[in-house]
Image (tube, rainbow, N blue to C red):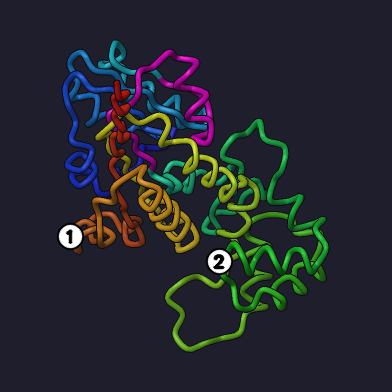
Amino acid sequence: MHAPHTPVLLEEVLHWLRIRPEGIYIDATVGAGGHAVEIARRLTTGRLVGLDQDPQALEVARERLREFERQVTLVHASFSRIEEIVRRLNLPSADGVLADLGVSSMQLDSAERGFSFRFGGPLDMRMDPQAQMTAAEIVNHRPEKELADLLYHFGEERDSRRIARAIVRARPIRDTGHLATVVAGARKARGRQRLHPATKTFLALRIAVNREMEELEQFLSRTPATLSPAGRWVVLSYHSLEDRMVKRAFQKLARDGAVQILTKKVIQPAPDEVRSNPRARSAKMRVAERKAPVITPVAEMSP
């Protein structure tokens, strides 16, 4: 079992969640439990519910949270099912909800999971091993145009058509190393490259395999109903597609009077944190607070 990853923007998350010892909190993407441990540490009579679709991550989180087992409930479920899980557990409305949308180091560093081109491994990329779709099926069976569109929309890959054409010609793609080599050979050289040539392709495939945009959309629409008035909602995103979706959802909810946006400017890790944890560099945090419903008094009937 790999060592759990370092939680990103930990102090900022704890500050904005404004944890009360008797409060109810939901870590909707508990992962290896980095944020959850510090939330649970601050609870007395309160309760923390952690969700994750990755059973391996939940196993690590359960071990890390063992000393807080009276306060913590862990559930194998995607964060898109937050409203269903709250009802099933008969939870009162939550004082805070956290969603860290990043892939953990534990997942990235597991060659057998196929998330990274840094290790040779199967083209899997499933967060939930019980899910049917794998990256291998997309790479080896999707039509060229569909593959190009996927790389362009989910990975914002400018060379999507060239890469899709190269992938189709090279089929069958055997593993992560083979795919990374094919993609690198297809991309146009544009000066000094900060990212590996296959970064955007792997990102796009991961998003497609796990239906991440659909899951996030459902999470954003369902979470407000789980929050108590003045309940805090903290979301950490790591790429522009996610961040735009979170930003727009918060803005719409604010226009509808459901939430107040507390972070007028997105919060990002300080340089010291990025130096100590390079995977934090692209993190962006947004925070909203559930507004109390306005109760209009019934006008007195005139005599």
- The local crowd at label 1, few if under 14, some if 14 to 19, many if 20 or more residues have their Cα within 10 Å, is few
Task: Check disc 2 and report the residue beneath it.
Answer: 200
Q: CA distance from mark 1 to mark 2?
A: 26 Å
Q: Is residue 127 above or below residue 19?
A: below
Find residue 277 and report its image quarter.
Answer: bottom left
Q: Which mark is residue 272?
A: 1
Instruction: Spot the residue most to the bottom.
Output: 191
Q: Which mark is residue 224?
A: none
Residue 56 placement, left or right of 256: right
- The local crowd at label 2, few if under 14, some if 14 to 19, many if 20 or more residues have their Cα within 10 Å, is many
Looking at the image, tell me whether mark 1 or mark 2 is earlier in sequence order. Answer: 2
Q: Amino acid at mark 2?
A: Lys
Position of residue 195 measured from the top left corner of the image (x, y, whole percent): 46, 71
Residue 298 placement, left or right of 13: right
Which quadrant is home to the N terminus?
Answer: top left
Position of residue 237 measured from the top left corner of the image (x, y, whole percent): 40, 53
Q: Residue at x 22, y 31 (%)?
A: 38
| Highlighted magenta segment, given as a residue range | 74-99
